[in-house]
Amino acid sequence: MLYINNLTKVYRRGVRANDGISLAVADGELLGLLGHNGAGKTTLLNQVVGLARPTGGTITLLGRDPVAEPAWARSVCSFQPQAHAPLTGVTVRQAIESIGRIRGGHRRAVRRRTTELLAALDIEQWADQPGERLSGGVRRLTAFCMAVVEPGRLVMLDEPTNDVDPARRRLLWAQVRELAAAGHGVVLVTHNIAEAERVIDTVVILNHGRVTATGPPAALAPDRQLRLEMSGTDAPAVPAWALRTSRAGDRLTITLAAEHAQLAVAWAASITGRFSLNPVGLEEFYLTLTANPETNPDATLVS
Amino acid sequence: MRPWFRSYLLLLRWSAIRLRYLLSLVLVVQIFLSVGIVLGFAFLLPQIDSATARYLATGAPTLGLITIGMVMAPQLVATAKTEGTFTYNQTLPVPRTAVVLSEVTTWLVVGAPGLLLGLLVAVLRFDLTLGVSWLAVPAAVLVALAATTVGLAIAYAAAPPVTNMVTQLIVFIALMFSPINFPADRLPEWLQTVHQVLPFQHMAQVVRDSLTAGPEGVSAAPYAVLAAWCALGFAATLHIMTRRT
């Protein structure tokens, strides 16, 4: 439903925020957009919804051009901006219902959907509290509800889990997944890679305005590697099966191949009782990709 | 037209809910202001003849409308910009004209009670007999529209701190250096020329002429000038709202 081709955005100050980005989102697909601060994620969303005008490249949304028809784009695309939603003086329920109605929903349907969302995210106890008395997390969840109460064919969420507690983050991910299951295309910007990895279908990693990796999370995460973390140790001799070793204070981190798991556990247990062994996920891949200029020569070009 | 009107009504309701606490405060301040100008200026002048009374009684509601449209409205927009409401509204699937007009409507409604109360106090204080013409309502609406559209244009165009300073300057100029509460011929000639272009003098004149039929009758020129300011303010506001970075 959404095709972005070679999209480039250069701001007047000369900042190249998007540099030849191409990606596609299908109906019912959940695309996760990852990248460091200033990588161009928000700029990308702003161009789709008509808040910013591309310098080059094309965007096709449901077969039409949102750059030429920004008003139409806003009607088929619901957007949760990164900035806090305007909630001063309105209760959570009023805000969600008002936006649902403004988005074109019918009164009763909006009311029902609002009640469902409040329950699904477990924020009913704040439903009738005005926005200025809410914590950051509840405000963020309210903003999420405002975006999805009457969702467009495309739903774009810019960091929806910021400030949200772990239990409600899970509830939120479930709602995001349900949107995709109902056939909406979803574009999700997040820094919460470890959690997003479990819900997104496709990941696009941006680095200084360019796509540096794209694909399903499982395909991107390094194959069958484990991470051993130990704390409270001196500097033991690094065993032969260690692929990578790093030390931060008294904490030692070793990356190893999965087949050496038993060796690693025995070795770690002989040194300290405080260790953990976990599979290496998308986050590690992301970090190597965006931090190491050798893996990604583009990073040095732009900054 | 129907989807436009639906958006307009829903936006009106949305801003009414959001601003209801603040608006009641603004309402009170505005009533104090209109009444205060009538009573306060009377202290300043030892003797008040009927001509002066006519200026004060009609100048007070005019200043009230200017304060609402060119000070309070832009300051609230500045706050909304700081809080992110402005950008948020830009992402909603509603016509931008509906957003602007719903804001303008809110301020027109807020301005009305102060205007009426100020007039009432003036009539009682100065034993004034008003000759209200059919133009009174259109004139007040035009003044409020001109003030609000220009005020919103300033707030949309400028950064919030700049808006706050500019609005202070506007109220200062309107109160002290504009022929609203006194005749224009008391000003130096160059300032009279400036006020031919600025909206303040014309605002005062249409309100005065429509409430107290003056000896010179009603002239069309100030209506034209105010309509031009309205158009300018509305066009600038819309341009800034639809502008893409």
Image: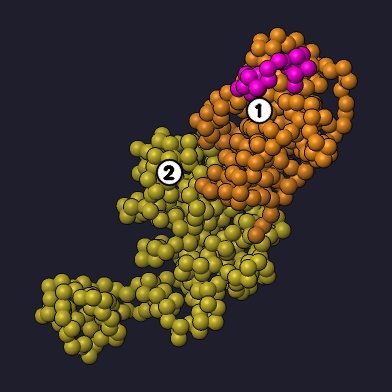
Chain colours: A yellow, B orange
Q: Quadrant of residue B175?
A: top right
Q: Which mark is residue A117?
A: 2
Q: Residue at x 16, y 81 (%)?
A: A234
Residue displayed at 67% across by 68% down:
A55
Q: Are marks 2 and 1 on the same chain?
A: no
In the rendering, at what x and y percent does residue A292 appear? 42, 81
Across and down, in percent, residue A43 comes to 57, 63
**Residue type at mark 1?**
Gly
Q: In the rendered structure, does residue B45 fall within the stretch colored magenta?
A: yes
Q: From this viewpoint, is residue A199 visible?
A: yes
Relative horizontal placement of residue B163, taking residue A132 as reference (left or right): right
Numbered range of the magenta stretch: B36-55
Q: Which residue is mark 1?
A: B64
| Chain ID at mark 2 | A
**Residue type, mark 2 in image:** Leu
Secondary element under disc 2, as helix, strand or loop, is: helix
Q: Nearer the viewer, residue B238 or B165?
A: B165
Relative image position of residue B96 (x, y in whole percent): 68, 45
Q: Nearer the viewer, residue B33 or A167?
A: B33
